[in-house]
Image (cartoon, rainbow, N blue to C red):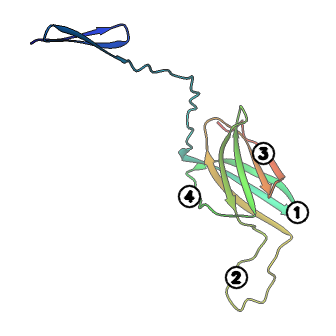
Amino acid sequence: MKKKYYWVAGIVTVLILVSGWLIFTSYPSVSITTTEMKVERIVYPDISKGIWLKININNNKFTLLNYEIVDGYPDYLSGSYPFVARIFSYDGKLLGEYGFGDPRIIQAEQGYTGPTWLDNVNFTLILPYFNNSKNINIYSATKLMLSVDISELK
């Protein structure tokens, strides 16, 4: 006996001729539907550049002293920090978030008897450079301490 197979408009139909009888067996075909999926491009920093910020903290007030593009930037470790710098794009998307310690705290060797806190301190912060970065916001917990427009650095 011969077996014949036919494919018909989305339904698999198998015709089997057995001892003169024609047997129809149908199976529903698999239909695949797609939904619209929004795909966002992942933005990576330019590893050859960094943004160098010189900042002053005086009586809890942050002031930008200077900023420029420099070669490279340091690696940042994850964890909990008292301050966080967030880099935003022109359309307001968060490009990167980098925590850092409080520069007013003096780290010293055991037995140090000098001050452990400075009310007025200058410090530098080097952050990754993104080609589409517009501004950097520095936060203490949820409070905005400093906002820097870096759109002119290209």
Pick whichever of labels 4 and 3 is earlier in the sequence: 4
Amino acid type of the residue that numbered disc 3 sits on in the rendered structure: Val
Q: Distance between the residues labelled 4 and 3?
A: 21 Å
Read off the residue under disc 2: 108
Pick whichever of labels 2 and 1 is earlier in the sequence: 1
Around disc 3, counting alpha carbons within 10 Å, would you say few (fewer than 14), some (14 to 19), or many (20 or more)?
some
Q: Residue 75, labelled with which disc?
A: 4
Around disc 4, counting alpha carbons within 10 Å, would you say few (fewer than 14), some (14 to 19), or many (20 or more)?
few
Label 4 with label 1: CB-CB less than 8 Å? no
Q: Which residue is at a point 80% across and 52% down the rendered structure image?
A: 64
132 horizontally vs 64: left or right? left
Pick whichever of labels 3 and 1 is earlier in the sequence: 1
- Considering the numbered disc 2 on the image, is that residue within a helix, a strand or a loop? loop
Read off the residue under disc 1: 60
- Considering the numbered disc 4 on the image, is that residue within a helix, a strand or a loop? loop
Question: With respect to residue 9, does 99 lie above or below?
Answer: below
Q: In which quarter of the image is the C terminus?
A: top right
Around disc 1, counting alpha carbons within 10 Å, would you say few (fewer than 14), some (14 to 19), or many (20 or more)?
few
Label 4 with label 3: CB-CB less than 8 Å? no
120 horizontally vs 97: left or right? right
Q: How far apart are marks 3 and 2 (CA)?
A: 31 Å
Question: With respect to residue 138, does 78 lie above or below?
Answer: below
Read off the residue under disc 3: 148
Pick whichever of labels 3 and 2 is earlier in the sequence: 2
- Considering the numbered disc 1 on the image, is that residue within a helix, a strand or a loop? loop
Q: Which residue is at a point 68% across and 47% down the rendered structure image?
A: 68
Residue 97: horizontal and vertical position, in percent?
A: 67, 51
Q: Distance between the residues labelled 4 and 1?
A: 27 Å
Q: Quadrant of the N terminus?
A: top left
Residue 127: horizontal and vertical position, in percent?
A: 64, 52
Q: Nearer the viewer, residue 25 or 21?
A: 21
